[in-house]
Amino acid sequence: MRRRHRSSELLDTGSAGAGQPAKTVVLLISGRGSNLEAILQAQLPCRIAAVISNRADAGGLDIAREHGIPAIVIEHGKFPSRSAFDEALIMEIEANRPDLVVLAGFMRILTPEFVEHYRGRLINIHPSLLPSYSGLDTHRRALNDGVKIHGCTVHYVTSDLDHGPIIIQAAVPVLKDDTPAALAARVLHEEHRIYPQAISWICSGRVALGGDGKVNFRLLEQPAPPLISPGLD
Ligand code: GRF
C-alpha cells in the first residue's frame, strides 16, 4: 500500500498499537477470493482467524488454506431457512471472537438479526460508486447508462442493502470500448487497494462507526486528484 506520511498524521505502525493485542478478523466469501488474497498479501495489523464460505467450491478456500488459515464451509442450501443459516454462521464466527467481520464477495443477503449483531463490526466491498448501482450486474448497468466514471466502495453493513456508511471509494474511468469484463477488471484492481486500506484503518483504530451511524475518521485526509473522464485535451 502506498503511504505518504506527514508529521501530524497518525502513523500506521503495522500493529494495533503499543501493548494492544492485534484485532481479530473473520472473512466471509462465496467465490474466487481475489479480495481475500489481496487482504492476506497486505500483511495488515490484524489476525485473520478464519475464512468461512457458504459454497464448498469457492476458490478462495484454497487461498485461505495456502496461507495456513482455517477454511470453513457452511453450505446455505443445507439449512431450512435464511435465519437458520445465519444462526449457524454466527456460531462459527463467534468461535473466533472477532473484532471485525469482512464480507469479501459473500453472495448471501444477511438477516437483519445478523446485521444488528455485528453492527459497527461488519464491512463489505461493492463494485460500484455507491449509492449508484447497488445490487447485481453493476458494470453492465454502468456501461448501459453511459457513465464516464465508475468504481468501488467499502462500507459498513446495515440492513439497508448496499447503503451503509461509506469508508472509502475508488473511481476509475469508463473507456470508449469497454466491455463489462474489461470494466470489472479495472474496478477489481482498485478493490484490491482500498479493501486492505479500510481494514488497516479499522484495525489500527483510525476508523470506526460512531453511535450516530456516521463513520469517524482519525486520519489526516490525503487529497486525491480529481478524475475527469474522458480526459481533457
Ligand atoms: C468483488 O467484485 C466484490 O466487489 C463483490 O464480489 C466480488 C468478489 O470477488 N462484492 P472476489 O471473490 O474477491 O474475487
Image: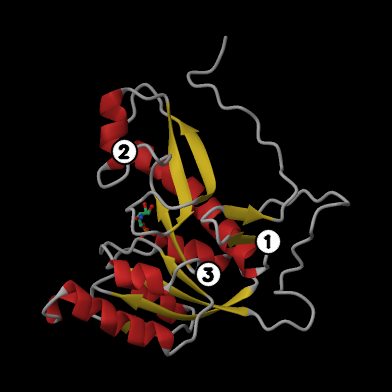
Does the image show residue 75?
no
Indicate left or right for 101 with 112 as reference: right
- Between discs 3 and 2, the one toward the N terminus: 3
**Residue labelled with disc 3:** 40
**Residue labelled with disc 1:** 206
**Which labelled disc corresponds to residue 139?**
2
Residues 52 and 120: in front is 120
The quadrant of the rendered image in which ligand 1 is seen is: bottom left
Residue drawn 39% across and 49% down? 163
Residue drawn 36% across and 42% down? 184
Check disc 1 and report its element: helix, strand or loop: loop
Tag 2: residue type?
Answer: His
Viewer-nearest of discs 3 and 2: 2
Check disc 3 and report its element: helix, strand or loop: helix
Residue 69's place in the image compared with 150, above or below, is below
Residue drawn 26% across and 34% down? 141
Q: Which image quadrant for residue 47?
A: bottom right
Residue 190's place in the image compared with 39, above or below, is above
Q: Residue furthest right?
A: 7
Tag 1: residue type?
Answer: Arg
> Image quadrant for the C terminus?
top right
Viewer-nearest of discs 1 and 2: 1
Classify mark 1: residues with Cα within 10 Å, few (<14), some (14-19) or many (20+).
some
- Cα–Cα span, label 1 and label 3: 20 Å
Indicate left or right for 21 with 176 as reference: right
- Cα–Cα span, label 1 and label 2: 31 Å
Check disc 2 and report its element: helix, strand or loop: helix
Tag 3: residue type?
Answer: Leu
User: What is the x, y in percent for residue 57?
Assistant: 23, 73
